[in-house]
Amino acid sequence: MMSDSKPRSPKGHLSTPRDALDALLAEPAGGPFRRALWLDELDQRFRPFLPPSLAAHARLANYERGRLVFVVDAPVWRAKLRLAAPELLDAARSLGLDAAELIVKTTTPVTASPQSDRKAKPISAAALQSLQAALASLNDPDPSGSKDTP
């Protein structure tokens, strides 16, 4: 008969990703993970307070020292979220946060690196000659068939 293929911990409990996450969260090193989970939960609690057209474009990024920080994906949503600041601060207070300020940041889309827009600089004659010699040595095997050089 085949044994159970699920890995077991030394204590005989099933070892699952959830068990590993729970163990990590119980440790002091789990602080950043606990905070990320708390912020995600807080973001979900804010969703009903966001204007419906804005909810898909804004996310709570942080709360610290009375400051709510939201991230939006375009400047137009930044302006709209700032207009909703009084209602969002009231909502934060209703959720038990001592919120006094709303900060809105706009994410920047990932684009090609600035270096890709640069033109290649011309290579010097000496560098070109050295490069050609190196390439030639790779392409031209030693006629004697020996890998050793004299």
Image: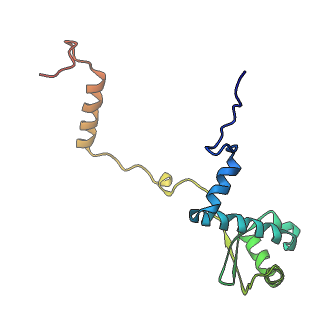
Tell whether 47 sits left or right of 101: right
Q: Nearer the viewer, residue 2 or 33?
A: 2
Q: Nearer the viewer, residue 79 or 88?
A: 88
Q: Is residue 56 above or below residue 103?
A: above
Q: Residue furthest front?
A: 11
Q: How many marks?
A: 0
User: Based on the displayed image, in which of its 4 quarters is residue 42 positioned?
Assistant: bottom right
- Identity of the residue drawn at 59% across and 55% down: 111
Q: Nearer the viewer, residue 37 or 79?
A: 37
- Identity of the residue drawn at 30% across and 30% down: 135
| Quadrant for the C terminus in the image | top left
Q: Is residue 86 above or below residue 143?
A: below
Residue 115: image location, x then y, percent: 47, 54
> Coloring scheme of the render?
rainbow
Q: Is residue 94 above or below residue 115?
A: below
Residue 35: image location, x then y, percent: 66, 68
The answer to whether residue 74 shows anywhere in this view is no
| Quadrant for the N terminus in the image | top right
Q: Residue furthest top?
A: 144
Residue 12: image location, x then y, percent: 67, 42
The answer to whether residue 94 shows anywhere in this view is yes
- Identity of the residue drawn at 66% across and 40% down: 8
- Identity of the residue drawn at 83% across and 68% down: 47
User: Based on the displayed image, in which of its 4 quarters is residue 5 positioned?
Assistant: top right
Q: Is residue 127 above or below residue 143?
A: below
Q: Residue furthest left?
A: 150
Tell whether 90 sits left or right of 147: right
